[in-house]
Image (cartoon, rainbow, N blue to C red):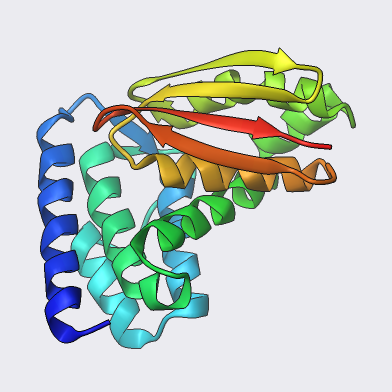
Amino acid sequence: MSTAQSSQGSAATQRELEQRLAVVGPKDTTRGFLFGSALELVRTEGNAESLKRCVEAAGTGNFTAFFSYPVSTFLKLTYAVARELSDKHGGFDGAMQHLGMRVAPRFLESTTGKMLLSLVGKEPKRLIDSMPSAYKTAWDHGACSLTWTGPKSGRIDYVNAVPGAYFAGSLMQILNAAQLKGARATVRQSSLTEFSVDFSWD
């Protein structure tokens, strides 16, 4: 990618970030473990300068797992992380999806996540059925609903200011955690804050 193309891409993502920030308010919050996962990813895949820029974007590097923090701060952090890691993951969207994939293990390892896994057992359908409840645990913002389209396929509809690629990555990692063969998750963004993630497995 040329320097001109790179700067145009950065300008476009910055404009998109500003549009997303404009639709969230002070009551829109999400949990600290999402912030922690994002910063942890930069620590492992980036460098000291990358981490510094991401911490500056978030305003701090200290987040308590199940405390609530503004979605606006999370947007600034996720965009900073995706920019820093875009070269490693095929672009901004690829980096955003990779970031989403790193969140699911963090949640499943938490006390709430472990309790959820113990309740659903090893039945993948029950694990996916729990996704809207898990969403409510993590977000005081937007909405999440599940529709099954077949025995091994379905769709999760979201309303959220964070890009759909992030949630596609998170769902993909949930499917992988359930050890489902041929798992697939693709996002369809219908507006700035509305999108669907179609999923299936063999």
- Kindly identify the residue that appears in the image at 10 percent across and 51 percent down: 15
- Kindly identify the residue that appears in the image at 61 percent across and 40 percent down: 185
- Kindly identify the residue that appears in the image at 25 percent across and 38 percent down: 70
Question: Relative to residue 36, is residue 176 depicted above or below?
Answer: above
Q: Position of residue 176 (x, y in %)?
A: 75, 48
Q: How many marks?
A: 0
Q: Position of residue 13 (x, y in %)?
A: 19, 57
Does residue 16 appear to the left or right of 173 in the view shown?
left
- Kindly identify the residue that appears in the image at 17 percent across and 49 percent down: 17
Task: In the displayed orientation, state which residue is furthest to the right.
Answer: 122
Among the 4 quarters of the image, the one containing residue 59: bottom left
Does residue 101 appear to the left or right of 190 in the view shown?
right
Q: Quadrant of the N terminus?
A: bottom left
Question: Relative to residue 34, is residue 59 depicted above or below?
Answer: below
Q: Position of residue 107 (x, y in %)?
A: 61, 43
Question: Relative to residue 155, is residue 175 depicted above or below?
Answer: below
Question: Relative to residue 141, is residue 167 depicted above or below?
Answer: below
Does residue 121 appear to the left or right of 49 in the view shown?
right
State whether residue 63 appears in this view: yes
Q: Position of residue 132 (x, y in %)?
A: 56, 19
| Nearer to us in this view, 8 or 54 | 8
Q: Quadrant of the C terminus?
A: top right
State whether residue 110 appears in this view: no
